Image (cartoon, rainbow, N blue to C red):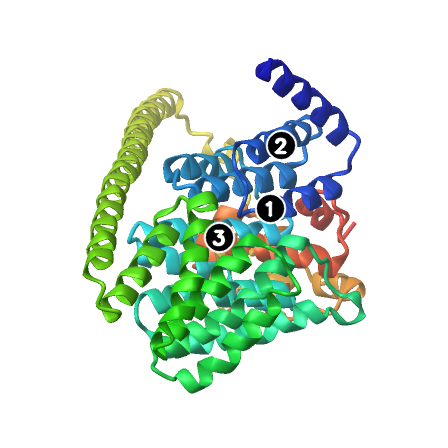
């Protein structure tokens, strides 16, 4: 019976979602309640992803996979979380045309997973890769979100001053986002709830720094915020930091009250190691200060159990990552061997061709050498073209000057469309010369993601239609 009802629910959901646009489907995904999400919400997301796949809504598919990964991570199923993140990459769902919010979401989720595995360099690298573009977007929600992530990482590493610097920025921009003057931002229910958390996080960092006087105001503000929003994640987060504050000022009764609420929320909604460990650790410290030995011993044992489970899971995940690296290395080795074989065969063919040519030449050599066609020197334009290509590959400062000799009206035509910086004109020249994203990244010593972002920004500046290939647009520029 339950299976039949589930199947009917799936059919109904699929029919309902098939009537929605991609933007409407994305809004539904963004509003899936993260804290209470479980198998039911994952099935709902699967229904949406099915519709997105049918209509080739790549942004919707990517967001669905990332949302599912985040839910699995919250429920302490990190292996499944990595599986869904890998699906985004394997199915090439994110590119230069993707909604920037989804690109940012991908980087933040991946960075969090790697940080929890102890891969801190990789975690920070993922944030650094997207940070400048996040700031350029000039969106308060994006700015607060990425700075909050940085603050969390620095705080976990006990680098309090750096954490405080980042959380101050996050706090400022979260307020701008909530005020939403002139209705500039799309407000999602889930986004709005999480934006309130910067207040209690600011308090938490001040508490860890021993500055309880400064923490007090933010704790009071965070408790007042709970009257504006009933989100379970926000309730857990704000009450947990309030408990830390009250323990620090020796108000053990209030601290215990808030921690027991947090423990109940974590037990029902958060299965991941972070939330379980945080509550257990705080309760252990509280009972130590209250000199309740039995309760202290209970939470010491619980922390040991959590740590043991984490180590086992991390080992499984590291094995998966190592296996993936080995597979990539094996594939790369096969590719290298294949290229070597092709090169060897090509070399043999070239040598054979040269041998046959010389043999033919000697056999038919005559005195009428003047009758033999002598190849003409390449025309000037072809010579300049080859030099432009060489300078581009060397990333030479002379490249743009020589390119303008090759295409004298290129900049003039571009400026008719939009005002561009010299660096942007140079980048346009690379595209006009039909260099691929990978080639441009290699020649300019930047990442593929940076090149994709630059292409995305150029599309907006030059008003290139979404359904037109950027290379086709540039090829028609001088015609």
x, y (%) of residue 293?
A: 19, 61
Disc 1 crowd rating (10 Å Cα; few below 14, some 14-19, many 20+) is some
Q: Nearer the viewer, residue 224 or 89?
A: 224
Secondary structure beneath dot 2 equals: helix
What number is the disc on residue 107? 3
Closer to viewer: mark 3 or mark 2? 2
Q: Disc 1 versus disc 2: distance between alpha carbons?
A: 12 Å
Q: What residue is shown with label 2?
A: 44
Q: Which residue is mark 1?
A: 33
Depth check, front residue: 447 or 351 = 447
Q: Nearer the viewer, mark 3 or mark 1?
A: 1
Q: Residue visible at 66% across and 46% down?
A: 471
Instruction: State the CA–CA distance, disc 3 to disc 1.
Output: 20 Å
Quick check: can you spot residue 448?
no
Query: In the rendered structure, which disc, 3 or 2, sits on the residue that comes first in sequence?
Result: 2
Mark toward the start of the polypeptide (1 vs 2): 1
Q: CA distance from mark 3 to mark 2?
A: 24 Å
Quadrant location of residue 156?
A: bottom left
Residue 136 found in image quarter: bottom right
């Amino acid at each position: 019976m339950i299976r039949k009802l589930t199947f009917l629910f799936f059919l109904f959901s699929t029919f309902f979602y098939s009537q929605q646009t991609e933007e409407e489907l994305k809004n539904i995904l963004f509003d899936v309640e993260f804290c209470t999400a479980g198998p039911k919400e994952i099935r709902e997301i699967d229904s949406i992803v099915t519709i997105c796949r049918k209509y080739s809504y790549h942004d919707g598919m990517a967001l669905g996979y990332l949302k599912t990964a985040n839910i699995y991570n919250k429920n302490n199923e990190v292996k499944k979380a990595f599986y869904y993140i890998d699906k985004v990459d394997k199915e090439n769902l994110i590119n230069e045309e993707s909604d920037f919010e989804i690109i940012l979401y991908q980087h933040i989720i991946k960075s969090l997973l790697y940080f929890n595995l102890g891969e801190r360099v990789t975690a920070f690298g993922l944030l650094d890769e997207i940070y400048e573009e996040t700031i350029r977007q000039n969106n308060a929600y994006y700015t607060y979100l990425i700075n909050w992530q940085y603050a969390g990482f620095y705080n976990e590493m006990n680098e309090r001053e750096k954490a405080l610097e980042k959380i101050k920025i996050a706090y400022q921009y979260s307020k701008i986002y909530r005020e939403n003057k002139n209705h500039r931002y799309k407000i999602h229910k889930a986004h709005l709830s999480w934006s309130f958390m910067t207040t209690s996080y600011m308090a938490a960092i001040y508490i860890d720094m021993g500055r309880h006087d400064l923490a007090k105001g933010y704790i009071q503000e965070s408790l007042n915020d709970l009257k504006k929003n009933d989100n379970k994640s926000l309730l857990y987060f704000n009450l947990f930091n309030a408990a830390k504050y009250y323990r620090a000022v020796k108000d053990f009764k209030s601290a215990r009250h808030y921690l027991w609420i947090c423990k109940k929320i974590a037990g029902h909604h958060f299965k991941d190691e972070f939330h379980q460990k945080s509550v257990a650790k705080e309760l252990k410290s509280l009972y130590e200060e209250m000199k309740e030995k039995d309760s202290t011993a209970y939470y010491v044992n619980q922390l040991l159990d959590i740590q043991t489970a984490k180590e086992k899971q991390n080992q499984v995940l590291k094995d998966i990552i190592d296996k993936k690296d080995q597979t990539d290395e094996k594939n790369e080795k096969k590719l290298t061997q294949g290229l070597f074989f092709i090169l060897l065969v090509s070399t043999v063919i070239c040598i054979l061709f040269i041998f046959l040519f010389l043999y033919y030449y000697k056999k038919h050599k005559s005195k009428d050498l003047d009758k033999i066609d002598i190849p003409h020197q390449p025309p000037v334009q072809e010579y300049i073209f080859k030099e432009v290509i060489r300078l581009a590959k060397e990333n030479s400062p002379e490249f743009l000057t020589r390119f303008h000799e090759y295409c004298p009206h290129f900049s003039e035509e571009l400026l008719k469309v939009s005002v561009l910086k010299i660096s942007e004109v140079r980048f346009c020249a690379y595209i006009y010369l039909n260099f691929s994203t990978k080639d441009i990244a290699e020649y300019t010593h930047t990442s593929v993601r940076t090149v994709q972002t630059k292409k995305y920004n150029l599309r907006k500046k030059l008003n290139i239609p979404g359904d037109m290939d950027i290379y086709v647009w540039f090829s028609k520029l001088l015609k």
